[in-house]
Image: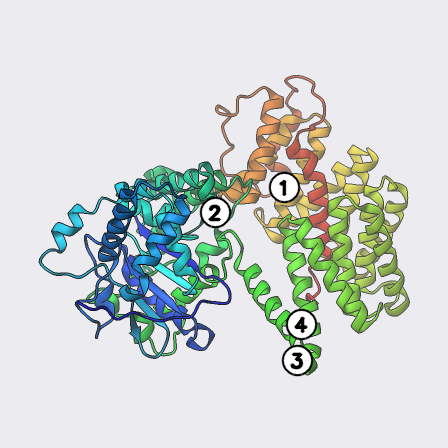
Amino acid sequence: MELTSLSLPPLSAGGEVITFYSYKGGTGRTMALANIAVLLARQQNATAPVLMIDWDLEAPGLHHYFVHQQENKPGVLEFFEACREQLLRRRSTGLAIDDDELAHEVLAAVGWEQYVTRVDESSQLYMMRAGRFDDSYPDRLASMQWEELFYACPALFRCFAERLSRHFRYVLVDSRTGRTDSAGVCTTLLPRKLVLMFTPNRQSLEGLQALVTRATTYRRSHEDEQRPLLIYPLPSRVDTGDAAERAQWRRGDATQHIPGYQPGFEELIRECYGLQQVSLESYFDEVQLQQNRSVAYGEQLAVRLDQGGDRFSMTRTFEAFLAWLAPGYFPWQSGGEIALLGSIGASRCALEEGGSAARAALQPLAHDLNLLGELYRREGKLRQALAALEESLSLRQRSLGEDHADTLASKTNLAGALRQQGRLDEAQFLDECILEARERMLGTEHFDTLTARANLAATLGLQGRVAEALVLQDNVLDTYTRLFGPDHLQTLGAKAARAELLLQRGDLQHARAVQEQVLAARRRLLGAEHADTLRSKTSLAYTLLQMQELDAARSLLDAVLQAHLRRLGPEHAETRRAREQLIDVQLQLGVPTDEAPLVPELHQDAAMDDYGDALVRPLRRPVQAAASSAWSRAADELLALDGHLYGSRTPPR
């Protein structure tokens, strides 16, 4: 039978292969791929070519979502049957040939074009079916040995993906489930991105984790296959009506022996990619594929059924997932970050166009860069923070002038990032410039002036110029006390910063007294588990540790850890930091970390009760003040957090 060949020009920039895989069936994997393919094909004014490949040859079904196809059209099975024949012919000649060269010769001889058909006349959406479903299909499928085909030409599948990526912006592969040779081809050899679909249960999670480990290990250990492989977990069939069960399977529940898929994937990503800290909090807040009765039966495309795509629709869910998947953002990047990066990218495009569009984009670009820099600074990504903040400041200096409020806001944020990175002389220069401008334009008691004075005090303190810093900080504290009273949150923030300076001077007793006052007031005003209250407990614990009152420090850190566990979960960065600090104290006390019990939930009303009679217990043994990595970071982080507390009271610019 004569086959009709498709003709598509090559792309100016290469596309990518994305495999959709589930360890178990029943996840809605094929349905998700079909809907996402339709959305991708609508992008760029429906001009981006998208190819779907049905590689689930044992249970093909992708073609049912797209009617009016040529039923006798060959597909994946026939394509690789032809590749096998071409390989046999070339091997029979006995000529030695490079593996990549052989693969490209075979693929060129077979030609993918005659195995692909268009399935949508309103966009460039194409499909390669599983195969021609005639009477011989089962026998032909049984005779296809994927492992033998791979060993006959190891580069074949990689080069197949490369050739398709020259003509299609996205190639979406619907993989077979389980541990099969064809699934290994689809998940390990073909893709740049791997979508892992699962329903929350142990079998699925364990199977996915094992597959990702195998795939990433293979990519790292084979020289020809050292290509990026990004993984995107996609929970499906999520019951939106049971919030408790939904949280239980996401976060985990030790009492029910439920591991929790979010901490499981965070640990997996840390291990596979060698990352120290990974948070999928923002990602899983947005990416959960809900159970939907309208698509539970038949082959319905939700993105074609939905009218308008309100926030409860499947369309909105798929679009939220595509916000990470399509541009290639990592799942551990927050939604706030990727939104800012998208806005910054749009502004840069406008600048390149020039004219009025460029002029209109200048200030939005500076604004978004400033916000992005602050986001990175809060996340501890100081290199990225400095790059964004420096560019924001440069744009505002050129267009607005040195003394404009937005320029000074950029200077303030940049000085904070420099302070965190230890570049104190540069931070001091900026702090002094900001303070001079604020005093000149706003007066000595304006809120922005007081913030600038406190920031300069923080920098001077870190430089070892504590006496000068205390003069500035005392001025800030006196002004806040006079204007707002001793228990105002701004006054308490100024007291906390003063305590840090006293600590740097070595005045532990006075620092402790101030910290206890701040803790008691914050607990009364904000609650025992408010972030500022927990920060005060950690600061006081650090002071007690330096005073060798280890039992008291341990009790405070127990309370902080318990609060973080309840509020944030076991894998949050704040929880991990609190756990590290508690372990550090337990080791100094000589308590094995696997035996040390956590204190029960505390119900006392007064802040001092958090460490109660621990203050009068005898020390077990004298020790030096903590010097571990957990605590060498803590003081700087706490000081930076107090500085951020000042700055966060005004709207971002």
SS at badge 1: helix
Quadrant in which the C terminus is drawn: bottom right
| Residue at the image position 37 percent from the left and 48 percent from the top | 102
SS at badge 3: helix
Image location of residue 635, percent across then percent down: 71, 39
| Residue ID for mark 2 | 227
- The correct choice, above or below, for 556 with respect to 246 in the image is above
Rounded to the nearest whole Å, what is the CA distance between mark 4 and mark 1? Answer: 45 Å
From the image, state whether disc 2 or disc 4 is nearer to you: 2
From the image, state whether disc 3 or disc 4 is nearer to you: 3
| Residue at the image position 67 percent from the left and 63 percent from the top | 369
Q: Which mark is residue 325?
A: none
The residue lying toward the viewer, choosing from 500 and 348, is: 348
Precedes in sequence: disc 3 or disc 2: 2
| Residue ID for mark 4 | 364
From the image, state whether disc 3 or disc 1 is nearer to you: 3
User: Around disc 4, counting alpha carbons within 10 Å, would you say few (fewer than 14), some (14 to 19), or many (20 or more)?
Assistant: some
Precedes in sequence: disc 2 or disc 4: 2
